[in-house]
Image (tube, coloured by chain):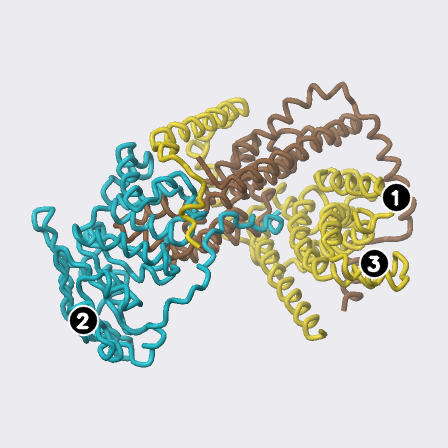
Chain colours: A yellow, B cyan, C brown
Amino acid sequence: MSTLTAAPALTPAAYVPPSAQFRRRMIWLGSCALLMVLGGVYLKFKPWMLFTDFHHLVRLGGEMLPPNLAMLWHKPALFKTIGETVAMSFLGTLLGGAVAFVLAFFASRNTAPHRLLRAFTRLGFGLERATPNFVVLLVLFIAFGYGPFAAMLALALGSVGLFGKLFADAIEQADPGPCESVASVGATRLQVIRYAIIPQILPSVVANSFYAFDVNLRAAIALGVYGGGGIGFELQLAMKVLRYPDVLALILFIIVLITGMERVSDFVRRRLIQSSESLK
Amino acid sequence: MLHVENLTKKLPDGRLLLDRVSLKVSRGEFVGILGASGAGKSLTLRCILGLTKADSGTATLHTEACGGKSYDLLTCKGREQRNCRRRMGVIFQGFNLVKRLRVLDNVMIGRLARIHPLRSWLYGFTDAEAAEALEALRRVKMDMHADRITGSLSGGEMQRVAIARAIFQKPAIYLADEPIAALDPSNSLGIMKLLAPLAQETPVVGVFHQPEMTARFCTRVVAIKAGRVVYDGDPRLSHNQLQDIYGDELMQVLRPAPTTPEPAIAESSRSLPVLANFA
Amino acid sequence: MLVPLVIVSAWLCQVRFSGLWHDLGKGLEVIRFFFPPDWSSLREMAGPALVTVLLAALATPLGVLLSLGFGLAGARNIAPPWLRTTARALIGVERALPEIIVLLLLVAALGVGPFPGVIALAIGSVGMLGKLFADAIEEIDPKVLESVSCVGATRWQVIRHAVLPEVMPAFLANSIFRFEVNIRASVLLGAVGAGGIGFELSKAMSLLEYERAMMAVLVTLLLVFGAERVSDWLRAKVMDGGRLA
């Protein structure tokens, strides 16, 4: 059991002395810092603005206080906008998830009808993920007009890329044993998918859906700012007309909304897991 | 050198964990502390180190090296406590090394209290200190592994590195908390063979589970039972004495140490954190 | 359970099926405008692309340092309870706040420019990295920290010589990953006033220069894919090397 003799023989001289280590570290740090400074110069990045313009930040903070929380009862329409935001991310997740679920079978090595199709679908997912969703949104605005519908579709499209990859990976990791046994009784390819693969990937599909919902909720707020409606749009409007107490109130609502929805989705997920375990 | 007197530790409900434990360690001694599990052996060491607060009693460390200064171990705080700890080299059951550092860096940690905190942050140790640490590693026959990542060592090797750290620390006393409990017999023997000569220069106090080891290597044995010192003297204990100390546990203790595999320590490749959840 | 939810959300999202085909046709029509991309504008895109990368490159280290502070303050084994609670609460708030809102606020106070962009991205990193760092630090075996403090080291020495080395690989890997995320985010923020390729893109869109916009999209894709590759490569290197000079 003693590994003293089995260990790779290193001569004692092989160690890097601290001074050399220090020098190497300094060179690394120094060059990184230099690059950053050069980058900052190119950007005309002025870090001292934090101090010279600090009074602007203080002024803004002063203008925002106290938050106009009264909005909540003076403006019932606010609830609708909050609902819009949640609805956007919910529907976007659902729609995107459904589409991705189907497409994922074309993107997995073990279920794809053809190699080329797989490569093609994977490429599509990759492009989808890489395209910033506000670009998609801008295009959708032209087609469907401003509003939550376009934003929802943008979220759905974005989810296809994210989900598609995750689902396809889950399918590829599915245990081939059950598939072979189902196939050996003469099942068609679709039946194999239905009875051997889907039961295996369902837990990861559910877990990823909840995760994507959380991501999409944040994205829905951001898309709102670009004109997608919902509370993000409301916030941007309040900014434009310089009603800062409203802005702060809306920010507080957003924080509550996101943390609250995180709790809710966590709770529902746990319930789902519990009920699926009790079924077994 | 180490003088513990009437060390007492109570549970909140008044039960005594340590009941007036007294202990005296002087130069050239290798003291083994024996006792059934839960008797308070390790707790005694933890109290001496200030890791657990004792309720009453005193513990003093006299150092001859630095002008005969003595340290009150139980009441010291902050800087004074760091000064105390710096003079005690500690070896743990679980080695407790920083697994991702090189072996040499782990040894050099022993000197942290001697260098200016600012230097330890910005520069680290000097080449001379590294050479000295390598010397300490040579003493435990680990100098070949100075440049390895500590997490990739085996248990026995890690314990050697821990001893090297304690040696490099140049303490006034070594405290070993079950140093061989997590090791297989051959490694245990190796560690004991390292500790025994150390004791000739600087006293060693160790908590052990194996009476046959203490009988072979220690110069004195102190037995603790239910928080009380019940024996202090010759390391060769008779069967009756052992029966008295261990009670029902005796059979377990006397059985040759089980040759279970060492706990998995080499976990050099811990998996990547789940990044996807934070996109 | 799911059906009424879907119906309510569909109503809220103003989903309409009449004219959907017509709109879809219109959408496809629009996509045609984007082709072919305006290759001649490629040269003009280089500058903004660099700006986007630099925004992320400046923001990531800043954000990492900030997150390190929050991570240490939010770790049970380092910070006292009151500090941990405060730090964790701040991290939670930050996580709930999309970067774009931080940017809007900063722009409202300081005007457009790279400064608000970098700061917004850096603050945005704290929500994710701060939590990851704090969790990673809390995972360290407390006995290791105890053993280092047993040689008489100060709390800061323990941080430097035990905590940091132990979390370094996770720390670097997450920071590199955050750089990738920041590239995406900086495109997004660019459209609101941080400059860079995002700004170029939204400008082209609002001027109805679709071919030019397509070029910007292609450059964006290149940046994002490139960042993904680089980050994967660096992460693999950091994780399997384990040896960090």
Name the disc covering residue B147, or none.
none
Q: Say if C107 sits above or below A112 in the image.
A: above
Circle 3 is placed at which residue position? A193
Determine the CA span between mark 3 and mark 1: 32 Å
Circle 1 is placed at which residue position? C24
Looking at numbered disc 2 in the image, what kind of residue is underneath it?
A: Val
Q: In this view, does A172 lie to the left or right of B132?
A: right
Name the disc covering residue B21, or none.
2
Residue at figure coordinates x 54%, y 44% from the top left: C174
Q: Which of A39 and B125 is in front in this view?
A: B125
Determine the CA span between mark 1 and mark 2: 86 Å
The spot of residue C186 in percent (x, y) is 61, 36
- The secondary structure type at the circle numbered 2 is strand
Residue at figure coordinates x 61%, y 25% from the top left: C50
Q: Is residue B239 left or right of residue A210?
A: left
Quadrant for the N terminus of chain C, please: bottom right
Looking at numbered disc 3 in the image, what kind of residue is underneath it?
A: Ile
Determine the CA span between mark 2 and mark 3: 71 Å
Badges 3 and 1: C-beta atoms under 8 Å apart?
no
Residue at figure coordinates x 41%, y 51% from the top left: C73
- The secondary structure type at the circle numbered 1 is helix
Q: Mark 2 lies on which chain?
A: B
Q: Say if A141 sits above or below B50 in the image.
A: above
Do we see residue A196 in this rendering? Answer: yes
Quadrant for the C terminus of chain C, please: top left
